[in-house]
Image (tube, grey):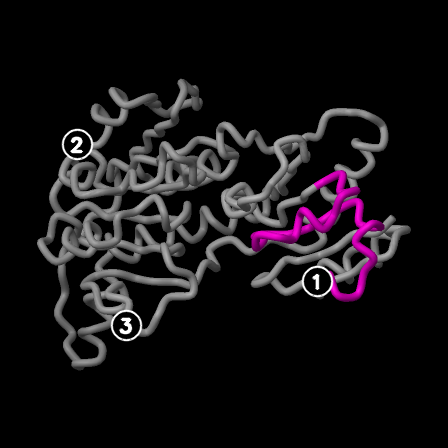
């Protein structure tokens, strides 16, 4: 029995070292070329090309080394019966909350303007407000909750939205299409922390953006596919959005001629908002393997029908 790691573009070295340090008793491989496919019982991956899974007839677990499993679920020859599990790391949730808080305050406190003024040696002052700003967090899983709590601690008036009703102490929550329509008109900061599913693909479009207050700030740490990027650029150019920060894009890595590079008041980062600790990933992978051996339910099993 062996484990195969195909985590590209995430470097596999950290996972290999964590398996060794954790005393994992089985052989570890990082390429189909150096393993007997019949020996592979567990596969750690982020995305897979077609043709890999049919070569592994004895596979017992497909383990996603990221919080979002959408790329694995998109594998065209994924067997419906194959268990898929994913990592859930609170340290990553904290990093993503830090990213969102920084991004929101960067725009609200006019940091892009002051950086421009610094380059021009211009010492002009401008009035800006960041206390009591209404913020709406889309997605109330562990990451979304951590983001909502972090914004609230720093003086934002936070609301949350989810597909089905959720309750958060001290915060107003909305659910479903009607709830979203109700929540958007006062959201001066909109944060997307949703998983990518058929229901959330293209959710952030011209119609949704038009329901926000003019000059609102948008932050996306979900997935690039949730945003119609041409609509985002148009909203930034028109001033309907006063600024945006996106850690995820439709095309990763982005091409040099991607129009996002030059969109006004847009901050881009290359999917680095919350980087998982390899030790945490492998710790939960080993736990999942043990649970399967005992015939017990997986703690973070992915529901393909829901997409997460």
In the image, is residue 22 above or below residue 31?
above
* Foreground disc of the pair 3, 2: 3
- Can you identify the residue that label 1 sits on? 14
Q: Residue at x 48, y 59 (%)?
A: 272
Sooner in the amino-acid sequence: mark 1 or mark 2: 1
Distance, label 1 to label 2, CA atoms, is 44 Å
Spot occupied by residue 149 in the image (x, y as percentages of width and height): 44, 36
Part of the protein shown in magenta? 32-61
| Secondary-structure class at tag 2 | helix
Q: Please say if 269 is above or below 131.
A: below
Residue at numbered disc 3: 257
Q: Quadrant of residue 202?
A: top left
Q: Is residue 175 above or below residue 88?
A: above
* Sequence-earlier tag: 3 or 1: 1
For label 3, the crowd category at 10 Å Cα-Cα, with few meaning under 14, some 14 to 19 and many 20 or more, is few
Which of labels 3 and 1 is toward the front? 3
Q: Is residue 70 left or right of residue 268?
A: right
- As measured in the structure, the alpha-carbon distance from the residue carrying label 3 to the one carrying label 1 is 33 Å
Number of numbered discs visible in the structure rendering: 3
Left-right relation of 190 to 72: left
Is residue 144 shown in magenta?
no
73 or 248: nearer the eye?
73
Q: Nearer the viewer, residue 199 or 93?
A: 199
Mark earlier in primary sequence (3, 2): 2
At a point 41% along the width and 45% down the height, the residue shown is 222
Task: Report which residue position mark 2 lands on.
Answer: 185
Q: Nearer the viewer, mark 1 or mark 2?
A: 1
Residue 127, percent from left and from top: 14, 55
Cβ–Cβ below 8 Å for labels 3 and 1? no
x, y percent for residue 208: 20, 37
């Amino acid at each position: 029995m062996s484990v195969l790691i195909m985590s590209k573009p995430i470097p596999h070295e950290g996972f290999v070292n964590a398996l060794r340090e954790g005393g994992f008793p089985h052989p570890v491989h990082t390429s189909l070329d150096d393993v007997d496919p019949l020996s592979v019982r567990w596969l750690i991956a982020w995305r897979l090309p077609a043709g890999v899974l049919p070569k592994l007839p004895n596979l017992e677990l497909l383990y996603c080394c990221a919080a979002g499993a959408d790329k694995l679920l998109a594998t065209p020859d994924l067997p419906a019966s194959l268990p898929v599990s994913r990592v859930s790391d609170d340290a990553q949730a904290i990093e993503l909350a830090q990213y969102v808080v920084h991004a929101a305050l960067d725009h609200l406190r006019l940091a892009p303007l002051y950086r421009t003024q610094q380059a021009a040696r211009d010492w002009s002052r401008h009035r800006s407000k960041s206390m009591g700003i209404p913020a709406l967090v889309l997605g109330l899983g562990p990451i979304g909750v951590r983001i909502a709590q972090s914004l609230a601690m720093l003086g934002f008036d936070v609301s949350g939205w989810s597909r089905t009703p959720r309750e958060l102490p001290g915060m107003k929550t909305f659910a479903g299409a009607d709830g979203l329509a109700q929540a958007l008109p006062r959201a001066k900061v909109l944060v997307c922390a949703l998983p990518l599913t058929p229901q959330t693909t293209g959710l952030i479009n011209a119609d949704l953006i038009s329901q926000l207050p003019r000059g609102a700030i948008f932050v996306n740490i979900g997935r690039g596919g949730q945003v119609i990027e041409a609509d985002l650029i148009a909203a930034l150019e028109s001033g309907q959005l006063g600024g945006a920060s996106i850690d995820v894009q439709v095309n990763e890595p982005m091409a040099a001629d991607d129009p996002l590079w030059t969109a006004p008041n847009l901050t881009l980062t290359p999917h680095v908002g919350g980087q998982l600790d390899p030790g945490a990933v492998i710790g939960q992978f080993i736990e999942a393997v043990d649970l399967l051996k005992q015939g017990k339910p997986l703690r973070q099993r992915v529901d393909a029908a829901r997409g997460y």
